[in-house]
Structures are given as structure tokens and as C-alpha cells.
Image: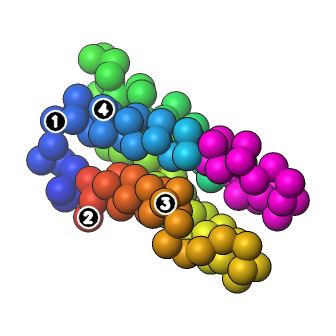
Amino acid sequence: MSKIANESTTIIVDTIMGECESIISEVEDFVNEYEFTTELDDFESIRYIAEELQSTIVVLEVDVLTEEQKTSTLAEAESLSIHLYQTIKYEVDALTELELFDYNCEEFMNLRDSINTIRSLFV
């Protein structure tokens, strides 16, 4: 978490909230477009993890948090971002193995860009 300690709380919250919104929107759009594919049930878990990350990180906007609480929240957010990264990677790989979708389709690239932006805050 060394890099994140150098960023302002506002930048961290705004970046994560915005990128999670992009992920959520991308998943919803993708699922709506390909609703005929039952293999998307697990793909939707990406959305739920992104929502959980948002609800975790939003508490950093509260000015009354102690440094210990901020550190704990950032550690939890980092853990969720790793889980989100792994889930995106696994689900994209799983769907492309079915040969229904191309690994480089725009939606998948957008998901990877968003999670990479989030993960770059922590590394």
C-alpha cells in the first residue's frame, strides 16, 4: 500500500468509485446484450464485487476516521480489488474458452482497463 499512502483520499475514492461504476455498467450492458447465454451467471459476480468495493471505499470520505480505520479500510479495499481482478480474469478467460466471445472484445478490454486503473493505486 505504499503508493496509495501518497495519494489524496479524494483521488482514491473518486478513482475507485468511477472505475467500479464503469465495471458495473459494462457487466450490466454485456449481460443484457447476451442474456441468451446461461454461462453469464458467474460473470455477473464481477458486478457484485465491484459494488462491494464501492461500499467499502466510500467510508474514506468520512472525516472522523482514525488512521487505523483508514488503514484497515484501505487494506480491505486492496483485498477486494485483488479479488475483483482475479474474478475478471477468470470470467473473461472462461467465456473466451467457450469461443462465444473474443478475448479482445471491447467490453472485456474496458473491464481490464478499469481494474488495472484500480490496481495501479495499490502497487
Q: CA distance from mark 1 to mark 3?
A: 31 Å
Give the label on residue 55, or none.
Answer: none
Mark pair 2, 3: CA separation? 25 Å
Residue 94 found in image quarter: bottom right
Chain part drawn in magenta: 27-45
Q: Position of residue 12 (x, y in %)?
A: 27, 39
Residue 27 appears left or right of 81: right
Q: Is residue 32 magenta?
A: yes
The spot of residue 65 in percent (x, y) is 32, 24
CB atoms of marks 2 and 4 within 8 Å: no
Q: Who's the residue at 38% across and 36% down the image?
A: 18
In this figure, which residue is indicated by the disc labeled 3?
106
Alpha carbon of mark 1 to alpha carbon of mark 4: how far? 10 Å
Label 4 secondary element: helix
Looking at the rendered structure, the number of numbered marks drawn on it comes to 4
Instruction: First in sequence, mark 2 or 1: give its number.
Output: 1
**Which residue bears the numbered disc 1?**
8
In x, y percent, where is residue 107? 53, 57
**Which residue position holds label 2?**
123
- The residue type indicated by label 1 comes to Ser
Using a 10 Å C-alpha cutoff, classify the residue at mark 1 as few (fewer than 14 neighbours), some (14 to 19) or many (20 or more).
Answer: few
Q: Is residue 1 left or right of residue 108?
A: left
Q: Which residue is mark 4?
A: 14
Residue 15 sits in quarter: top left
Circles 2 and 3 in contact, beta carbons < 8 Å: no
Q: Earlier in the sequence, mark 1 or mark 3?
A: 1
